[in-house]
Amino acid sequence: MEQPETQFREWHLGTPLSDEDIAQVRAGDIVYLSGPVFTARDGVYEHMLVRGNEPPIDLRSLTNVSLQSSPAGVEVSPGVYKVSSLQATAGFRYARYMPPLLERYGVKAVVGKGGMSEDVYRDIFKPHGAICLSTMGYGLGAIYGKAVERVLGVYWLKELGISEALWVMQMKEFGPLLAEGDVQGHGFFTQVNEEINVQLSLAYAGLRPPVFRRLGEEQRPEQELF
């Protein structure tokens, strides 16, 4: 198996992304985006990809970057919105929507939180020449929000509500974003977890099992899950 590069780099890219832009990004790199992006999470995915409702704008010609987020935004005057904070939601929940999203709308970069499995990158993202980017923790929500130059439009408000609606935003230096999955099919967290798991048992040495447990939570000290 081809091994990914170990020297991480920083990229400042404009949207829509070109194939050349995407090809140079490797898992572990840091990316900043400038240009239009659109949001899509549970509501948009179901409304657009499952129920077959076409967006009221031509997403394919506007941008090829999708953000799995519910912006903390308000309507300050009729049709004018202001976003104060921007944080993505867990990306692995949406793996089943990726084939139609990438194929129908030409999406080349999906921004979420925590990424997806390396199988998804290899079997879905790689054939479509797409990458997966991850936000870096909850504490950066206000910083990400500052990257929103303006809101170009908010769609399906009546159908989905403001939190699940399709937002289109003009970004400037939106980042830092971690390249979690690249076009080679590599996943950054998978690589890092392999290194961590070797020594993980030492961190749990002498500790009792947790008293409070959630159903389905990972309890094996030799296996850490994202």
Image (cartoon, rainbow, N blue to C red):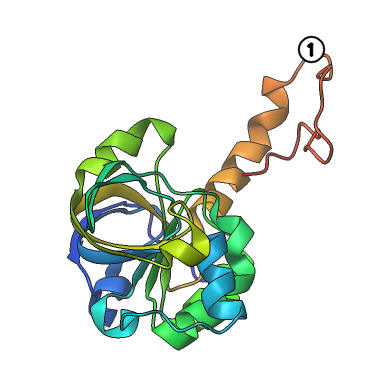
Q: Could you tell whether 186 is left or right of 109 in the image? A: right
* Residue 171, percent from left and from top: 20, 57
Name the residue at 81% across, 35% down. 220
Disc 1 crowd, CA 10 A, few/some/many (<14, 14-19, 20+) = few
User: Can I make out residue 182 in this image?
Assistant: no
Image quarter for residue 205?
top right
Instruction: Give the residue at mark 1.
Output: 206
Counting labels gives 1
Image quarter for residue 95?
bottom right
Name the residue at 26% across, 53% down. 9
* Residue 5, percent from left and from top: 38, 60
| Residue extending furthest toward the front | 78
Quarter of the figure that contains the C terminus: top right
Q: Nearer the viewer, residue 26 or 176?
A: 176
Q: Nearer the viewer, residue 126 or 2?
A: 126
Quarter of the figure that contains the N terminus: bottom right
* Residue 72, percent from left and from top: 36, 42
Name the residue at 46% across, 63% down. 158
Q: Could you tell whether 108 is left or right of 63 in the image? A: right
Local SS, label 1: loop
User: Can I make out residue 171 in this image?
Assistant: yes
Name the residue at 50% across, 75% down. 125
Q: Nearer the viewer, residue 176 or 9?
A: 176
Type of amino acid at the residue the image marks with label 1: Gly
Q: Could you tell whether 94 is left or right of 176 in the image? A: right
Residue 193 against residue 132 in the figure, above or below: above
